[in-house]
Image: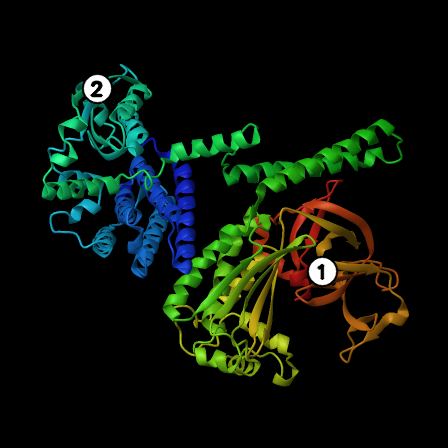
């Protein structure tokens, strides 16, 4: 068991956030470049920078196994960066880096889940061996080096050893930093980054200044020794050293020979050909065109560029713990409730308080703006979840041998953070279902059906009247109603005669627990779990899922979710002595009923005819067992609600009016009564302090 080093606990959250963000960027770059079958120099530099940053931050946190793993991946991309052509058609590199990314994520998750600071440290030796072998293969593909110079393409240090020891172009200086400046190792590292792009060869002692704080003591005692070969002018490099931050002085230990002492014309032909070859390896390693800026320098340059372009101050962005946002959101909810209690106080009825009413209107305006601001803080784009589906499609494409184009639209659509977190599993199941069940296994079947050889899988999000609609669709073989009905019959899932099922009802059977059309369980599906979990998770965040499929043409899964769960616009109605809140997003219209509109079906159930369409009537007092004097349909009010392509007219005593309410969950001690299955999703506190129950139309109609 490994243990988190004391004093590092406060930095863990930032480490997890930054590392996970970098790993997501890594996956995105790899997926994009693999699909395009092309690495440009910026992609290679970015991957190298990601690995370098992860290596350093992991070492700082004391996660040595993660640091070494990132270091070896960095070494492999060092070779790719110096010789980009080696990556052509080398698919194993992608698989290997994805393994690194997955291993990193698994180890980070294990660390996050630890309770007492202890966690199981994973041994990555097998994966590290693969990275080392891949590095060697890439070096061989890029060039067929001689036996004595093969290691030169791996790293600057190895290249320096392969170079002639008596290179007349090298200059060695010893640098001394200001007394008491502290962290001499980091100042030495910054100095190296300052002159790196001006040198074709560069080595320094101590060599571990980036990762070893103890090297500061050696620098104070012996100075910091730098040996370099300038690209153009040695004086320019020396001036950079002299003007560097915290450098007190330097002395030249050995200088490069003047050009006239070794004129090219006097060299014999053979040495003249060999000398540049010996220096070529380090020159390639440290070429300025390939050398990336450090993370700090890159960020600073970007900020300065933006400021110069806009002439404005930089925008300050900070990361905030989600728990703090939840607490802020709860406080705002309480403020809204309290404001309603003050303004609607029964003691104020009948009083003409002009100044009070004016102040109350201003207060309501400000609380509304405060609420909108807090809600906007919690809103995050769906891009993060959508991009993760790219990886799933990529892996299944390779394992199933199916050629599929994956298209994403509307990833900039914003949803509450809590809902985004709940969507990852449902979307993963749906994407896997489309890849495994939907897209045809045999390309010839697609060709015979007049479809392109490549299948198409789409993930689309769009805003629609206070809710977000997410569609996962494929152009595969679609759902076979006969096959589904037959399988449901064998599993004993039918509740009525087969002839009475509509095609829509048959399609929705795949959402039932335990149902699967696969005859044998595979790595991806066939065990009868997944689709029912999708439905449960979607409904848990206040959404609904419907299926639209046509045999031979494809299937679409349509998810409708609210923008936020915490505060909703509702219509308050009374039933007996109780107040209920119905979400306005589900209400199509409200109206008084006339006797001529009432009809009855063959089972004597009440229905109402509206514009030629019959809708069932649900009496709230019967549903919830409430005593009320309003039992005649003509005396009450009907609300036509629609959800999940199902409609019903809810009968209540009367309408109170529209009200924005803060959703509160039921107390935990009520969970044993399974209240939500009865059609109630939560409750809210009214302005007079009473409680209103929030109706869950999905469950109520279902």
Residue at position x 17%, y 24% in the image: 255
CA–CA distance in space, label 2 to label 1: 81 Å
Residue 494 in view (yes/no): yes
Q: Which label sits on residue 624? A: 1
Number of residue marks: 2
User: Residue 334, image x and y in percent?
Assistant: 66, 37
Q: Is residue 393 above or below residue 486?
A: above
- Choose the circle earlier in sequence order: 2 or 1: 2
Residue 583 in view (yes/no): no
Looking at the picture, the colour scheme in use is: rainbow
User: Residue 701, image x and y in percent?
Assistant: 68, 65
Disc 2 marks which residue?
220
Quadrant position of the N terminus in the picture: top left
Q: Is residue 697 left or right of residue 672?
A: right
Residue at position x 31%, y 42% in the image: 118
| Between 641 and 164, the one nearer to me in the picture | 164
Residue at position x 48%, y 30% in the image: 304
Q: Secondary structure at mark 2?
A: helix
Q: Which image quadrant for residue 209?
A: top left
Q: Residues within 10 Å of mark 1 (few under 14, many from 20)?
A: few
| Between 348 and 27, the one nearer to me in the picture | 27
Q: Secondary structure at mark 1?
A: loop
| Between 637 and 3, the one nearer to me in the picture | 3
User: Residue 22, image x and y in percent?
Assistant: 40, 45
Quadrant position of the C terminus in the picture: bottom right
Name the residue at the front extreme. 265
Q: Is residue 677 above or below residue 381?
A: below
Q: Residues within 10 Å of mark 2 (few under 14, many from 20)?
A: some
């Amino acid at each position: 068991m490994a243990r988190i080093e004391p004093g590092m606990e406060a930095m863990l959250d930032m480490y997890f956030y930054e590392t996970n963000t970098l790993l997501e960027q890594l996956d995105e770059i790899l997926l994009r470049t693999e699909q395009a079958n092309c690495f440009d120099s910026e992609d290679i530099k970015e991957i190298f920078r990601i690995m370098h940053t992860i290596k350093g931050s992991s070492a700082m946190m004391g996660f040595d196994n993660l640091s070494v793993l990132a270091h070896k991946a960095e070494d492999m991309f060092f070779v790719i960066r110096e010789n980009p052509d080696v990556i052509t058609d080398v698919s194993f590199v992608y698989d290997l880096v994805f393994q690194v990314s997955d291993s990193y994520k698994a180890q980070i998750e294990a660390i996050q889940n630890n309770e007492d600071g202890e966690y199981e440290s994973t041994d990555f030796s097998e994966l590290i061996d693969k990275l080392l072998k891949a590095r060697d293969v890439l070096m061989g593909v890029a060039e067929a080096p001689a036996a004595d110079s093969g290691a030169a393409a791996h790293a600057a240090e190895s290249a320096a050893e392969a170079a002639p020891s008596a290179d007349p172009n090298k200059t060695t200086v010893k640098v001394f930093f200001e007394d008491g400046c502290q962290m001499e190792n980091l100042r030495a590292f910054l100095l190296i980054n300052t002159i790196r792009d001006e040198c074709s060869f560069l080595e320094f002692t101590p060599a571990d200044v980036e990762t070893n704080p103890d090297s500061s003591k050696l620098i104070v005692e012996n100075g910091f020794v730098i040996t370099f070969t300038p690209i153009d002018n040695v004086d320019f490099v020396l001036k950079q050293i002299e003007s560097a931050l915290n450098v007190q002085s330097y002395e030249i230990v050995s200088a490069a020979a003047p050009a006239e002492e070794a004129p090219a014309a006097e060299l014999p032909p053979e040495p003249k050909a060999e000398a540049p070859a010996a220096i070529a390896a380090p020159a390639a390693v440290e070429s300025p065109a390939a050398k990336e800026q450090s993370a700090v320098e890159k960020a600073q340059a970007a900020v300065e560029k933006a400021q110069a372009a806009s002439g404005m101050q930089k925008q300050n962005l900070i990361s905030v713990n989600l728990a703090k946002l939840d607490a802020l959101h709860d406080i705002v909810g309480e403020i809204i409730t309290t404001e309603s209690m003050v303004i609607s106080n029964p003691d104020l009825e009948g009083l003409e308080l002009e100044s009070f009413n004016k102040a109350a209107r201003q207060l309501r305006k400000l609380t509304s703006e405060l609420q909108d601001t807090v809600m906007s803080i919690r809103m995050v784009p769906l891009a993060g979840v959508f991009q993760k589906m790219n990886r799933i499609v990529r892996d299944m494409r390779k394992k199933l041998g199916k050629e599929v184009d994956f298209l994403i639209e509307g990833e900039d659509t914003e949803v509450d953070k809590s809902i985004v977190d709940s969507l990852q599993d449902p979307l993963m199941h749906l994407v896997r279902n489309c890849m495994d069940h939907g897209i045809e296994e045999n390309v010839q079947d697609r060709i015979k059906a007049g479809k392109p050889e490549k299948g198409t899988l789409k993930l689309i999000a769009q805003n629609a009247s206070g809710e977000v609609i997410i569609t996962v669709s494929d152009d595969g073989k679609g759902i076979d109603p006969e096959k589904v009905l037959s399988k449901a019959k064998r599993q004993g899932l039918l509740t009525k005669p087969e002839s009475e099922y509509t095609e829509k009802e048959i399609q929705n059977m795949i959402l039932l627990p335990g149902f699967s059309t696969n005859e044998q369980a595979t790595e991806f599906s066939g065990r009868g779990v997944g689709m029912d979990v999708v439905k449960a998770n979607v409904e848990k965040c206040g959404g609904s899922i419907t299926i639209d499929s046509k045999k031979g043409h494809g299937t679409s899964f349509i998810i409708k979710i609210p923008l936020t769960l915490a505060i909703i616009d509702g219509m308050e109605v009374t039933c007996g002595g109780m107040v209920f809140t119905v979400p306005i997003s589900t209400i199509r219209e409200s109206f008084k009923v006339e006797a001529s509109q009432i009809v009855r079906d063959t089972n004597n159930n009440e229905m109402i005819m509206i514009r030629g369409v019959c809708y069932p009537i649900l009496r709230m007092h019967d549903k919830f067992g409430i005593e009320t004097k309003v039992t005649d349909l003509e005396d009450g009010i009907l609300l036509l609600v629609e959800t999940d392509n199902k409609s019903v007219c809810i009968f209540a005593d009367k309408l109170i009016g529209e009200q924005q309410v803060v959703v509160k969950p039921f107390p935990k001690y009520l969970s044993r009564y399974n209240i939500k299955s009865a059609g109630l999703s939560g409750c809210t506190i009214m302005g007079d302090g009473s409680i209103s129950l929030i109706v869950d139309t999905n469950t109520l109609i279902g």
